[in-house]
Structures are given as C-alpha cells and as structure tokens.
Amino acid sequence: MDLFGSLRSLELPLGHPAVFGSGPLIVRGIIDATNDLDIISRGPAWERACVVGEVGFVEEYGVDIVQCFDHAITIGRSSGYGDFDIDHLIDTAETIDGLPFVRLEHVIAYKRIAGRPKDLEHLRKLEEFQQDHI
C-alpha cells in the first residue's frame, strides 16, 4: 500500500494535519516504510477525518483517533506520549512531496519520551543519517 498516496486521497485540508511518528523518517529514507502512518490534526482536518474514517478512542493513552484504510492511517488530535503543542507541530511542519511532516527535532523528542524499542532503533538510525549528511 502506498501510505502517502492513501493519505493524499483523504483530502485533509492543508495547514491542519501533519505526518508524525515514523513518517518523517520514512519519507527521508532513514527507515524503511512501515505498514502505517500516524497523523496529527486539528480543526478542519480532524473534522474531515471523522467523516472519512472510523472514530475511536485509545484508552491506554487517553486519545481520540480516527482509523482509515484498515488501520493503515491513524489520525489524532494529540500525542499518546508527551505533552506536545499540536498547533506548533503543525504550524512548523516541513512540506515534502506536497505533504506536511513534523520537523525532525520534534520527532526526536517524541521518540525519546516514548522510549519503546522501535523508537530507540529509529533514534539510532536517525543519528547515523545525520552524521552522514553533515
């Protein structure tokens, strides 16, 4: 599945969503594509997501989500880890191939807080990538 193409097909209003989690690493080739994308959203993008996807609640993290494409794309209004200013993450997102991606410094902070084994591996690969591109 082309995750980024699927995301485009949702037609979320620009300026209101941003790809978060591992997506900013995938688009740069830092890690291999996974089978899902996490999107943060606000206002019109959240409203659109609620129309096109399956609305749910993740009790473990206390967050509202919308699932699309059999859980391949998860859209939320907050982060399951840490206390991030979602407006700031979206407002400072970088556009790559026509899609907004949360800046790497914010992804690093998120992955450090989450601290799961996959996050630690992603941080290691990101450090290697940054050293190779200095």
Image (spheres, helix red, strand yellow):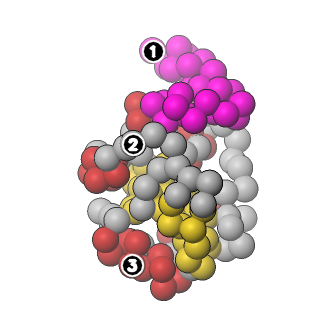
Q: Amino acid at mark 2?
A: Asp
State the quadrant of the C terminus: top left
| Residue for point 40% across, 31% down | 105
| Residue for point 71% across, 30% down | 117
Q: How far across and how far down the image is residue 45, in percent?
A: 38, 71
Quarter occupied by residue 111:
top right
Q: Nearer the N terminus, badge 2 or badge 1?
A: 2
- Residue tagged by mark 1? 134
- Residue tagged by mark 2? 83
Measure the C-alpha gap from mark 2 to mark 1. 30 Å
Mark 1 Cα shell of 10 Å, populated few (<14), some (14-19), many (≥20): few
State the quadrant of the N terminus: bottom right
Q: Nearer the N terminus, badge 1 or badge 3?
A: 3
Foreground: disc 1 or disc 3: 3
Magenta residues span: 107-134
In this rendering, does residue 9 appear at all? Answer: no
Mark 2 Cα shell of 10 Å, populated few (<14), some (14-19), many (≥20): few
The reply to whether callout 1 and callout 3 are in contact (CB within 8 Å) is no
In the image, taking residue 40 as reference, residue 120 lies left or right, namely right
Mark 3 Cα shell of 10 Å, populated few (<14), some (14-19), many (≥20): few
